[in-house]
Image (cartoon, rainbow, N blue to C red):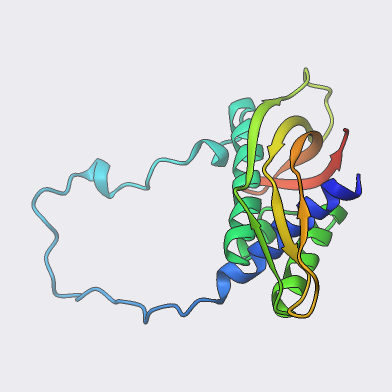
Amino acid sequence: MRRHLAYAAAGAAVLALAGCGDDPEPQVADPTATPSSSSSPSESAAAEKEPWEKESEEGVIAFAEQWISWFDQSKQTGDTEALAAASSSECTTCQNYIALTKDIYSDGGFIESKGWRVLSVSTPADDASPTTRVSMRIAQSPQRLKRSADAKTEQFAGGESTYTAQVRWVEDGWTMMSLDIVE
């Protein structure tokens, strides 16, 4: 179990650094410019939602996969912003991942990994709960973790694990409410 927590911690650490880059100065369109003649009303309408942005069974499964993607991005970039936005403040595991990631990167550490790969995602029959339970089987690649600039680099072999997540549709999107390792 400690190995899985280390993997998770390593992933969260990377998310914390992703938002640290320099953002270019915003570009403002010239208000006198005329729109292209090729624009149609359907093109100017709101862009179609991503699968994980829809309140449906397919949407909850897509959200779980997207959450893992944000988790992986954190390991590559150190930016936890997207992961935090998709995670409830009540999700202790999520908040621990985010805090540990921030600590690792702020202390000069790093997490190196090829990421997690979702092998399967499923939801049980509707149980009338305000949250939806999602089961995810995850393949975790080997990782290298350095908790601070002065720490010794740790290595983890990787492997497969099953996680159970509780997600809830809040206002206009899914939110990770809890995440627990099953095996």
Q: Is residue 12 above or below residue 156?
A: below
Q: Is residue 35 left or right of residue 56?
A: left
Quarter where residue 111 is shown: bottom right
Residue drawn 80% across and 66% down? 100
Name the residue located 67 percent from the left edge and 53 percent from the top edge: 86
Q: Position of residue 114 (x, y in %)?
A: 59, 48
Q: Is residue 124 above or below residue 116?
A: above
Residue located 83% across and 46% down the image: 4
- Can the viewer see residue 14? yes
Q: Is 57 situated left or right of 145 in this image?
A: left
Give the residue drawn at x 85%, y 48%: 3
User: In the orientation shown, which residue stands out farthest toward the left?
Assistant: 37
Residue 119 in the image: x percent, y percent? Answer: 65, 28
**Quarter of the figure that contains the C terminus:** top right
User: In the figure, 27 relative to 66: above or below?
Assistant: below
Residue that lies at the very extreme toward the top in this rendered image: 125
For the N terminus, give its image quadrant. top right
Is 10 in front, or is 60? 10
Q: Quadrant of residue 123?
A: top right
Above or below, 6 against 122 in this view is below
Which image quarter: residue 11?
A: bottom right
Residue 51 percent location from the top left of the image: 51, 35
**Of 15 and 148, the residue lying toward us:** 148
What is the x, y in percent for residue 26?
36, 78
